[in-house]
Image (spheres, rainbow, N blue to C red):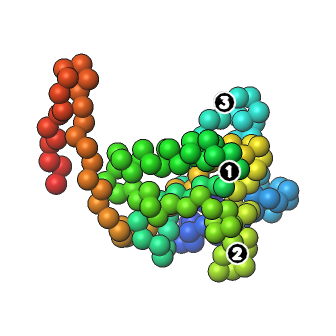
Amino acid sequence: MLNPDGVTRGQWRFDTNGVNLNRKYNSTDEHLYPTILASKKAVLEDFKNGNLKMYMDFHAHQSKRGCFVFGNTLDDIDQQAEAKMIPKLMSMNSVNFDFRSSSFDDCKNNVADWQGDSRSGSSRAAIHRHTNNMPLVYTLEANYAKGKLINNLQKRYDKENDRFLEEESNI
């Protein structure tokens, strides 16, 4: 959590000054946004050392229903396919994840939000740029209360015993 001062006052992603910290990843002002710059520095240090394979920022979504990701546009078609693979696998293994609601289009994902701040300053967009367009960079969004669908999952396969497993009901 990068805005504990705001959260303690009941704010979601805003600090005590009412600033949406997830639009400040392009900033270099360490006095105004110390948590943002510290987290960005740590992530980029891991990238520089070859220890970062995927980056995922977690958010709750107020209006769009369901659970989905925002990804990035990649010029290389193989990298774009790689970027979509993780969310596709998530949808195949989670009853609540909606791959079809996910977006990998920078033109849509980086528009200005309702306050006029560009989403190109979000952690997803900034980390993607600063890692030379690493494909596996996402924001995972989940609605506060409602989903859109329930995925039907394939039965799990027990490779050792060459059989499908019967699922236990958790309902």
Q: Mark 3: which amino acid?
A: Asn
Q: Nearer the viewer, mark 2 or mark 3?
A: 2
Residue 10 rendering spot, x and y as whole percentages = 54, 72
Q: Residue at x 44, y 57 (%)?
A: 99
Q: Which residue is painted at 49% across and 44% down in the image?
A: 86
Give me the C-alpha separation between circle 1 and circle 3.
21 Å
Kindly identify the residue that appears in the image at 53 percent across and 48 percent down: 84
Q: Earlier in the sequence, mark 2 or mark 3?
A: 3
Which residue corresponds to mark 3?
51
Occupied quadrant, residue 81: top right
Give the numbered dot on residue 41.
none
Q: To which residue does mark 2 refer? A: 112
- Give amino acid for label 2: Ala
Q: Name the residue beneath numbered marker 1.
A: 74
* Residue at disc 1, secondary structure: loop
In the displayed structure, does residue 125 sit left or right of residue 89?
A: right
Rendered location of residue 29, percent (x, y) = 85, 59
- Disc 1 versus disc 2: distance between alpha carbons? 20 Å
First in sequence: mark 1 or mark 2? Answer: 1
Q: Residues within 10 Å of mark 2 (few under 14, many from 20)?
A: some
Q: Is residue 20 above or below residue 137?
A: below
Residue 78: image quadrant is top right
**Among the 4 quarters of the image, the one containing residue 16:** bottom right
Q: Is residue 57 left or right of residue 95?
A: right
Secondary element at tag 3: loop
Q: Is residue 131 above or below residue 102?
A: above
Work out whether residue 142 can be spotted. Answer: no
Q: Residue 88's spot in the image, x, y percent?
A: 44, 48
Give how far across and how far down residue 148 sits, in percent: 35, 68
